Amino acid sequence: MAASSLPSHNSKFEPKLERAQIAWSEEGVPTSTMFDDVYYSKLDGLAEVNYIFLKHNQLPERFETLLPNSRFCILETGFGAGLNFLTTCLLWLEKSPADAQLHFISLEKFPLTRSELAKAHHAFEEVSEPSNALLDVYPLHLPGWHDVFLYDQRIRLTLWFGHVMKGLPEFDVQVDAWFLDGFTPRKNPDMWQSELYLQMARLSNEATTFATFTAAGDVRRGLAQYGFEVEKAPGYAQKREMCFGRYAHSRPFSSKAPWFERAKGGHPSPKKAIVIGAGLAGATVAYQLASQGLSVTVLEQEKAVAQQASGNLAGAIHPLVTADWNVRSQFYLKGFECSLRWLRPWFDSHSIVGQQNGLMQLAMTETMLQRLQEALTRVGLPKSFAYWCDADQASDLIGQKTDHEGLFFPEAGWVQPTSVVTQCLAHEAIALKQEEAVVSIQPVPDQNSQDWQIMTPNSTYQADVVVVATGALNGDLNEQLNLPIRPVKGQVSHFKAADLKGALKTTVTHRGYSVCGDFGAQSPYAAISGATFEAPDLSPILSDASHIENQRLATEALPNWLADSTDMAGKVGFRPTTPDHLPLIGAVPDFEWMKTAYFEQSHTHAVYRYAEQRYQPGLYVSNGHGARGLMSVFLAAEMIGAMVTGDAQVMPKSLYHAVHPARFAIRHWRSGKR
């Protein structure tokens, strides 16, 4: 059994995770000292799982009769030692079609460590294989949503670390079966409350089943109150009774933010996609859609790909940490995890240029020093994710003297964006068309079609899915889609080996970033440093003043790294930025419909009186990635891929809202300004 609390909705968010407090019996069974209850039966934990959760949710029969390419979703309250998940994995691999995917969601307030999980699993030889697969990808102990994939993505595990009622409202999935675990209602009353059953009803349909080890009267009455038919059965081992059942009485639920509700269902059978733009944002979403079976055409207005910031020799890959673990921190942690999931196999196969050599974030100001140190203590960053270094320790890791303390991220590093673009566009289902500047995107003039027509000076293209990933400089398209994109010029400086007094052993961020590496046979350079922020300058010409500024900032952080050099080389690019420094990702709303549905209405009505957002079918955007594009474009690609095919969400609802393409217009209206 495992624990998950149910705080009130207005409770203050405290990001730091609490550790599970465990005592081990002589038989090796873990017991929670906090709840004075065992995690699973001392007699046979696996038999208990099979009896309570698999049998009473009819999972053997349901898995065996799934259609090809099906999705099946299980949501569990309390991950605990993970035995429910491991046992379900074995059944899924045995019974389900090879192309079906299990989405197993579990919420846990007090997660066990990797070593504690391994110890708990050691007694069960039957689950050794899925246990090893889980332990290989088990996420960091950081609050919130974590996705991991097992068995070539046949199984997706979404773990929510934190309060159940902070987690459940973040999900927008159709649950097929519920595992109501967690310590007994008498010892963990905070979880077993009406809000739990309300969220269960919201996420259930008439085929949804549930099972739980308890038959407590309050639990049965709570489930029945929210539409579940409840039956009792003999309990496992010494437990007298358990209960199980199904959702039988559906009810409507109104959204708390109807203007941000996701597009429902995706295209019924998407076959062709057009992606506009061949930078990082366009290439990654093209690769994602091609991997999902679509035929993709990428239109690029330049003679070559990755001509703006995506064309830099190197970019840093690292998360953003803040003391309050705000929305930006949560988004870029999710993006960082997603980026590494994409990049690691390509690093291992030498398919891209880059290195996961760690990253030192130097605290160049007192404000930065305080922010990073507060993040360490308040958020409780695990050492495997980040740890503090004094100036001497930082100097040793960097391989160059620095006078500044900093935070070291051992899993971070750098990558050459152009190599990622090339790798993505090499997919056999992608056709690249260069020197094709898009002049218009219009629905096909046929009422029976949901396709889009894309016009260039040379050709006309048609597809059922269009993704606009044009970056900062295509003002006409950005304006057409109501995207508040602002181009911000950035210049990086390139250095040859003779310009350096020594190499950097790790990637470094300071007031900019600096990387040493092998940038490929075609590059004569050994290091890159930058980048400037030069809004509103839109000149594409390299500037001596910008080179001097890059050298100054690098020398401020690393005083002995650069030699005197008069050979100025580098690159200018334009970052697509937004007012709140988060990208714009997802389905493009129907702004004309929004005028009537929202903007011409009072902003003070109860939210249930507003209709859910309406979108332009098949039209999506991935833009505004700014200076952190390497930590957002891969996640954006997965988000759009899931929207196109109607798959489950890839991150919490609050983060979808934070990057919604209409958020600025909605905020303006909700503020009462007209």
Image (cartoon, rainbow, N blue to C red):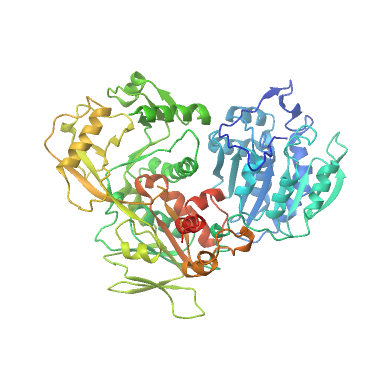
Q: Residue furthest top?
A: 392
Q: Is residue 34 above or below residue 549?
A: above
x and y, in percent, of residue 358 in the image: 38, 32
Could you tell me if residue 392 is visible in this image? yes
x and y, in percent, of residue 79 in the image: 66, 38
**Number of numbered tags placed on the structure image:** 0
Q: Is residue 399 above or below residue 471?
A: above
x and y, in percent, of residue 32 in the image: 71, 27
Q: Which of 2 and 442 lies nearest the eye of the viewer?
A: 442
Could you tell me if residue 245 is visible in this image? no
Residue beneath the point at 49% across and 50% down: 658
Would you say 154 lies left or right of 190 here?
left
Q: Is residue 115 above or below residue 185?
A: above
Residue beneath the point at 48% across and 53% down: 638
Among the 4 quarters of the image, the one containing residue 407: top left
Q: Is residue 146 above or below residue 35?
A: below
Would you say 178 lies left or right of 627 here?
right
Please identify the quadrant where the N terminus is shown. Answer: top right
x and y, in percent, of residue 155 in the image: 59, 48
Q: Which of 545 and 71 lies nearest the eye of the viewer?
A: 545
Residue beneath the point at 73% across and 22% down: 25
Q: Which of 334 and 541 lies nearest the eye of the viewer?
A: 541
